[in-house]
Amino acid sequence: MPSVLYKLQILADAAKYDASCASSGAKRSGNCKGVGHTTGTGICHSYTPDGRCISLLKILLTNFCIYDCQYCVNRISSGTPRARFSIQEVVDLTLAFYKRNYIEGLFLSSGIIRSPDYTMEQLIGVARVLREEHFFGGYIHLKCVPGASPELQIRAGRYADRVSTNIELPTETDLKRLAPQKSIQDIHSAMSVIRQGIDVSQDRSYSGKSPPRFAPGGQSTQMIVGATPNSDAEVLQTADRLYKTYRLKRVYYSAFSPIPHGDARLPLSEPPLLREHRLYQADWLIRLYGFDVSELVNASFPDLDLRIDPKLAWALRHRDQFPIDLNRAPRELLLRVPGLGIRNVDRLIQIRRWKKIRLEDLSRLRCPLRKVRPWVVTADYNSEVFRLDRSDLIRRIVCPQQQLELFDTGSCGSGSPLTRS
Amino acid sequence: MFSLRMPLSFDSWRESARVLLARGVPPEQIVWIDSNQDALFEDLSDFPGQTRFGLRISRFFIQRARLVACHRSDDRWALLYRLAFRLTHDDPHLMQLRTDPDVRRFELMGASVSRDRHKMTAFVRFRRSSIDGVDWYVAWYRPDHFVVRLAADHFRDRYSIMNWSILTPDESVHWDGQQLRFTEGIPTPLKTEKDEVESLWRTYYRSIFNPARIKTSAMRREMPVRFWDHLPEADLIHGLLKEAPSRTRQMIRHSERTDL
């Protein structure tokens, strides 16, 4: 009988290719019968040297799998060592880690054993024991198995704070080629069942009572980038469709990473981390900055520029829309200025009700002046703005050193590089 | 010039500041000194100003000031008073001028305190021990600022059915299932027995790390090295980084050919 330590080693290793670690979006106050509460903002309890945070105990229930998805370390044809936790073992591990303040909760996924329904029942079993027998109030993220029955997906949403169904690859053709047993219809219908569950739980129109909780942290998905030769346009269009159709909280982009026992038909190289970083930046621009996908990537520019961030790339292509007057422009235009993040835009709007904005205000807000100056008009003299038409503008903004730093910018699953700029 | 000795707490600052503001004592004339004795006010009656009543100050300022008061820097009381004076005597909209040097510093100090409180909720690590046959979870932690009281409710809500103690150099907090108690600080970590769950946690940390993705600057920024000595997983980092390149090369070399 293999020890829990041995299984943990295998089943954590097998789970690390899932990028999500978010523990945010759900609020639950403590109860007096069990441990745990969630604050709504999420807590990252540790960080590994890959720059990712550890917020949840992220493991598979088992890495035995009847599917043969080429990009996956756990596919049936891979020679990876196998293990399977019992429901009780996962419950005990979660509680032991939680009580020592190592984690916010559990992110449980699994290889497909016997059938999607059987697998889903096992995952729900863990969540049920945690919630109903131990009154666990921490965060639970369950992976939805595509093809499992809608009733089971609804039960998962009752116990979980977040559920996710992975879209896996940018297009249906890719999925057919690399993951022949998975169907895009199953993935979409799982997302749609969860969407409806969330909608019902938020509906208060029939009676005054609030309906039972259902995945208050919303649903998310993950797309592997770099395993197939898709353009960034295809990746972002798929993401955008999912955001619009199922109102996903997040799409995670996971740079395809070499795996132990990897399939030789897949690219054998370092994961495209910089590309992943640019995709997250573009994703942020689409969700929060009012950009349309087609403004960032389109037929003429199918891929994001790896050297510079997507907002700067857009601005360089649309210099006719600049300069922008920081003292007059509406919020949606301020959001388009390279180097200005949401928080600083809102601060500027607040300040300018009381005084004129000058360059020194930008430096006090720690805006990257080198990046912002060419695009804006302030109350004082800004010589850089006259260089807007010059062909060497990009070199004045980005020096090679900065590009290196950008490359090393961390993107923990739940945070984004842009929130810090 | 007044030297004002007062205890280390926001409420005592507030009491003193209320009197001084009503008298219109300008910030340049006060030296604030942290002290465990009661506030001294003898000199104040000599101040020749008129007492004003009904001074009002924004709720936003008071809320944030409670955070800034937990900052470790010596000038926090002076900064709070200077802002309170400017808000009441000069410009009631001052807090909106977020690039004003005082407002900016106030904001940054508040942000570091609230970040430090957050880091405490993240990086405290309990070890289970047994006191008179009862499980007790004990942690030693060193926050940057005076955040123990700010973070105590979080731990109480989360671990309400456990007995626990968090010891820090400034002050310690204990929960016995009934009430929070605060006691004096413990300057250095206690020698406690190893908790067997730590080896599971270290195994998890090793296994969840992907050697093909190295981004140490992100890790160091979010988990500053000064917190590492009480994280049971942190001494693994060096070794993981050292073996990462060879593990990645091996993964690439050992890919399995399957028939198409």
Image: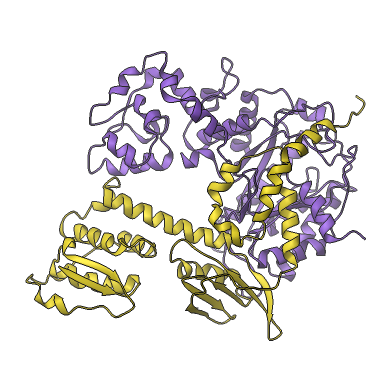
Work out whether residue B238 or residue B129 is closer to the camera in this orientation and state it.
Answer: B238
- Position of A82 with respect to B235 (left or right) is right
Q: Position of residue A266 (x, y in %)?
A: 80, 27
- Position of B92 with respect to A254 (left or right) is left
| Quarter assignment of residue A350 | top left
Q: Is residue B197 above or below residue B94?
A: below
Work out whether residue B108 or residue A150 is closer to the camera in this orientation and state it.
Answer: B108
Q: Is residue B106 above or below residue A410?
A: below
- Residue at 53% x, 47% y: name it: B221
**Marker count (numbered):** 0
| Quarter assignment of residue A274 | top right
Task: Specify whether residue A173 is in view.
Answer: yes
Q: Residue furthest bottom?
A: B132
- Residue at 30% x, 47% y: name it: B98
Q: Residue furthest top?
A: A391
Work out whether residue A119 or residue A91 is closer to the camera in this orientation and state it.
Answer: A91
- Residue at 37% x, 14% y: name it: A389
Q: Which chain is purple?
A: A
Q: Is residue B24 above or below residue A259?
A: below
Query: Chain B drawn in what color?
Result: yellow
Q: Position of residue B259 (x, y in %)?
A: 92, 26
Work out whether residue A216 or residue B106 is closer to the camera in this orientation and state it.
Answer: B106
Q: Is residue A16 above or below residue A231?
A: below
Q: Quadrant of the N terminus of chain A?
A: bottom right
Task: Specify whether residue A161 is in view.
Answer: no
Q: Position of residue A65 (x, y in %)?
A: 87, 44
- Residue at 69% x, 32% y: name it: A271
- Position of B194 with respect to A179 (left or right) is left
Q: Position of residue A297 (x, y in %)?
A: 56, 22
